[in-house]
């Protein structure tokens, strides 16, 4: 309320009453970074349960229990006949390291969308003003896509992460239902030979043993890589334009979607060339994930959670020192960083950091 009074006092001294309303509207339309952080903190607190349960499902359920159960049930057998393997030649051992490049590029695309939600309206306006200053006034008409006045409100970071996490957790649960119901012979080279496999020895061990996704067998239908790729594309379709104040399906947004589709096509080829999955794993993921996303958006969570501005204003009315505000914002930023880090661990499926390799002395 003090900020509002200051704006009113300054504008009444130097301008008309209409200037007061315009300035207040501008301040509300373009919240500062600190205000945006407080909005994210409120949304995070109100959606903590679905976020926490989704992470537990992904980190403990998908990465540990379900994967270990699949490996525990796995039996070595000959590789199945697959049309994708007949079309694409297998990667050499030297080129196997390139198999995850498309999904890593998709991380950057997701990060671009999330950055736009984190900046909010004010951040997009500052970017637009900076570009206008660099390009000159005559080129301002080329920057219409950055004008937030004609665009819907920016989505919030926590809302986007919550929607992606929940759909991702449900998708991994559906994966577990399929690959635990029927165990297929492995497609990877290390799964068609009994040597070098280290599955859980007991059923109890399935509930606590951690290992890398690269050493696991039996978790095939459907592809977890394609689950993430299609989920990211659906997220870009829904939030990519609004996150940066772009026109829905405009040139920039369409280009971003085209990039996602190219990454999906390359990832499909690389999955088959690396023999990480059969073609059926990719086909099932291709129609399951968009349908799951559509069902979640229309039935489970049709709308994103909105900020309770009255509660936010009541919270702001309590006097607090700048140090306390800074500490609170740092805690929220750290919590969001840990949230994203855990999501990356889930996507990469790697617990190797818990099992460091033993140091070996160099050979003279």
Image (cartoon, rainbow, N blue to C red):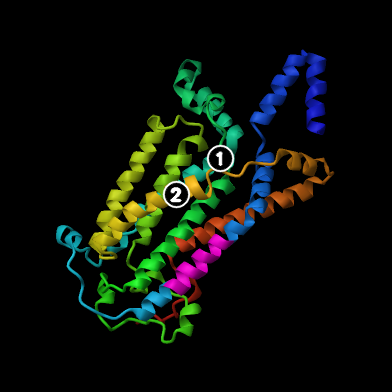
Q: Identify the residue at the far bottom of this view.
A: 202
Which residue is pictured at 67% across the width and 49% down the height? 41
Residue at numbered disc 2: 295
Report the side of 195 relative to 109 (left or right): left
Label ID, residue 80:
none
**Above or below, comparing residue 233 to residue 6 in the picture:** below
Place residue 223 in its image quadrant.
bottom left
**Above or below, comparing residue 228 to residue 30 in the picture:** below
Q: Secondary structure at mark 1?
A: loop
Instruction: Look at the image and say whether residue 237 sits in the magenta stretch.
Output: no
Q: Can residue 4 be seen by looking at this rendering?
A: yes
Q: Residue 61 location in percent, x, y?
A: 49, 69
Q: Secondary structure at mark 2?
A: helix
Residue at numbered disc 1: 155
Q: Residue 306 location in percent, x, y?
A: 63, 41
Quadrant holding the N terminus: top right
Q: Nearer the viewer, residue 127 or 314?
A: 314
Which residue is pictured at 26% across the width and 74% down the height? 185
Nearest to viewer (mark 1 / mark 2): 2
Report the side of 210 relative to 221 (left or right): right
């Amino acid at each position: 309320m003090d900020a509002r009074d200051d704006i009113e006092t300054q504008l009444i001294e130097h301008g008309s009453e209409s200037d007061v309303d315009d300035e207040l509207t501008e301040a509300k339309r373009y919240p500062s970074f600190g205000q945006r952080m407080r909005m994210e903190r409120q949304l995070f607190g109100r959606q903590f349960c679905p976020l926490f349960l989704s992470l537990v499902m992904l980190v403990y359920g998908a990465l540990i229990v379900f994967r270990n159960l699949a490996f525990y049930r796995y039996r070595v057998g000959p590789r199945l006949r697959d049309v994708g393997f007949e079309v694409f030649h297998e990667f050499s051992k030297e080129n196997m390291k390139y198999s995850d490049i498309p999904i890593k590029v998709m991380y950057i695309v997701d990060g671009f969308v999330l950055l736009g939600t984190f900046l909010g309206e004010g951040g997009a306006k500052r970017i637009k003003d900076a570009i206008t200053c660099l390009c000159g006034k005559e080129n301002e008409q080329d920057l219409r896509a950055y004008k937030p006045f004609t665009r819907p409100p920016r989505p919030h970071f926590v809302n986007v992460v919550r929607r992606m996490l929940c759909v991702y957790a449900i998708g991994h649960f559906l994966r577990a239902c399929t690959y635990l119901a029927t165990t297929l012979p492995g497609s990877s080279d290390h799964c068609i030979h009994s040597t070098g496999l280290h599955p859980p020895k007991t059923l109890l061990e399935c509930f606590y043993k951690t290992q890398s996704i690269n050493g696991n067998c039996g978790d095939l239908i459907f592809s977890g890589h394609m689950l993430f790729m299609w989920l990211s594309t659906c997220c870009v379709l829904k939030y990519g334009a609004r996150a940066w104040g772009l026109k829905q399906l405009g040139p920039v947004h369409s280009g971003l979607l085209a990039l996602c589709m190219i990454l999906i096509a390359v990832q499909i080829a690389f999955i088959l060339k690396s023999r990480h999955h059969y073609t059926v794993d990719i086909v099932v993921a291709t129609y399951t994930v968009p349908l799951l996303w559509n069902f979640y958006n229309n039935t489970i969570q049709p709308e994103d959670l909105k900020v309770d501005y009255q509660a936010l204003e009541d919270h702001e009315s309590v006097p607090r020192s700048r140090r306390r505000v800074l500490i609170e914002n740092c805690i929220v930023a750290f919590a969001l960083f840990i949230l994203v880090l855990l999501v990356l661990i889930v996507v990469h499926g790697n617990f190797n950091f818990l099992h460091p390799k033993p140091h070996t002395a160099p050979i003279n």
